[in-house]
């Protein structure tokens, strides 16, 4: 009987450690997402004030794409953390997760009419994330249009992001490696 209790205790501790790691991973991912969103919005204001040059335009495009990737990955990390997504998930599970999260926010904000294009939104969202994360440079001619995505779906992206700024707005636990890296930079001067 003592062996079974030890095994149960080990299993429980392993699950707790996994949950803590996944929570820290999600916090770190959200911190990256928040930073890229803030920088994108800053650049957007510069463009709106006619203070753009090629550097600003390139960064505006890049930071929006990176923000989208981080937001997508954050929702996937939360899906994994909450066991909505298992280890062997496919693109349909990711699509369903994005659709469900968006629908949930529509209902939360009492928006009764859920748009019919959420499946298309989820597909395009995943395509942009895949383009940024996986596509080799020889396929650059097949890039999904970020302009079209922004025009059609940015309102959904805002819906997915803005509530997180309040619900996840607490200091990110700094991982030991981040502290060590910062110290290394400081000490190498």
Image (cartoon, grey):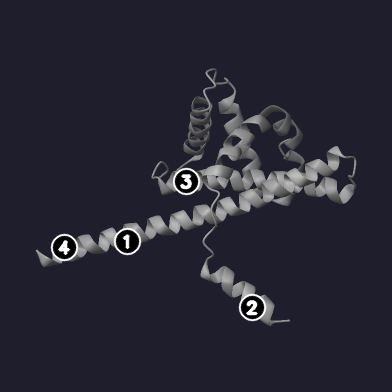
Identified at 63% across, 35% down, the residue is: 158
Q: Are marks 1 and 3 in contact (CB under 8 Å)?
A: no
How far is disc 1 from disc 2 in space, using C-alphas?
Answer: 31 Å
Identified at 52% across, 66% down, the residue is: 175
- Secondary structure under badge 4? helix
Q: Quadrant of the N terminus?
A: bottom left
Q: Can you identify the residue that label 2 sits on?
A: 184
- Secondary structure under badge 3? helix
Identified at 58% across, 21% down, the residue is: 115
- Residue 77 in sight here: yes
In the image, 165 versus 16, the foreground residue is 165
- First along the sequence among labels 4 and 1: 4
Q: Quadrant of the C terminus?
A: bottom right
How far is disc 3 from disc 2 in space, using C-alphas?
Answer: 31 Å
How far is disc 4 from disc 1 in space, using C-alphas?
Answer: 14 Å
Q: Few, some or many C-alpha atoms within 10 Å of disc 1 (few <14, some 14-19, many ≥20)?
A: few
Q: Few, some or many C-alpha atoms within 10 Å of disc 3 (few <14, some 14-19, many ≥20)?
A: some
Task: Tell me the tag on residue 14.
Answer: 1
Q: Few, some or many C-alpha atoms within 10 Å of disc 4 (few <14, some 14-19, many ≥20)?
A: few
Q: Position of residue 161 (x, y in %)?
A: 60, 40
Q: Can you identify the residue that label 3 sits on?
A: 78
- Residue 135 in sight here: no
In the image, 73 versus 154, the foreground residue is 154
How far is disc 1 from disc 3 in space, using C-alphas?
Answer: 19 Å
22 vs 185, left or right, is left
Q: Nearer the viewer, mark 1 or mark 2?
A: 2
- First along the sequence among labels 1 and 3: 1
Task: Tell me the tag on residue 5.
Answer: 4
How far is disc 4 from disc 3 in space, using C-alphas?
Answer: 30 Å
- Secondary structure under badge 2? helix
């Amino acid at each position: 009987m003592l062996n079974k209790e030890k095994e149960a205790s080990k299993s429980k501790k392993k699950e707790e450690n996994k949950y803590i790691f996944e929570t820290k991973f999600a916090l770190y991912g959200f911190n990256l997402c928040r930073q890229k969103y803030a920088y994108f919005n800053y650049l957007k204001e510069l463009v709106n004030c006619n203070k753009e040059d090629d550097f600003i335009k390139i960064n505006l495009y890049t930071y929006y794409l990176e923000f989208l990737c981080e937001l997508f990955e954050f929702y996937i990390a939360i899906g994994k953390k909450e066991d909505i997504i298992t280890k062997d998930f496919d693109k349909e599970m990711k699509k369903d997760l994005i659709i469900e999260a968006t629908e949930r926010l529509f209902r939360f904000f009492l928006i009764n009419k859920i748009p019919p294009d959420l499946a298309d939104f989820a597909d395009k969202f995943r395509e942009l994330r895949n383009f940024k994360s996986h596509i080799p440079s020889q396929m650059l001619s097949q890039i999904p249009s970020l302009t079209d995505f922004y025009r059609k779906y940015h309102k959904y992206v805002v819906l997915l992001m803005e509530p997180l700024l309040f619900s996840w707005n607490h200091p990110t636990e700094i991982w030991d490696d981040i502290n060590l890296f910062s110290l290394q930079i400081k000490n190498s001067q």
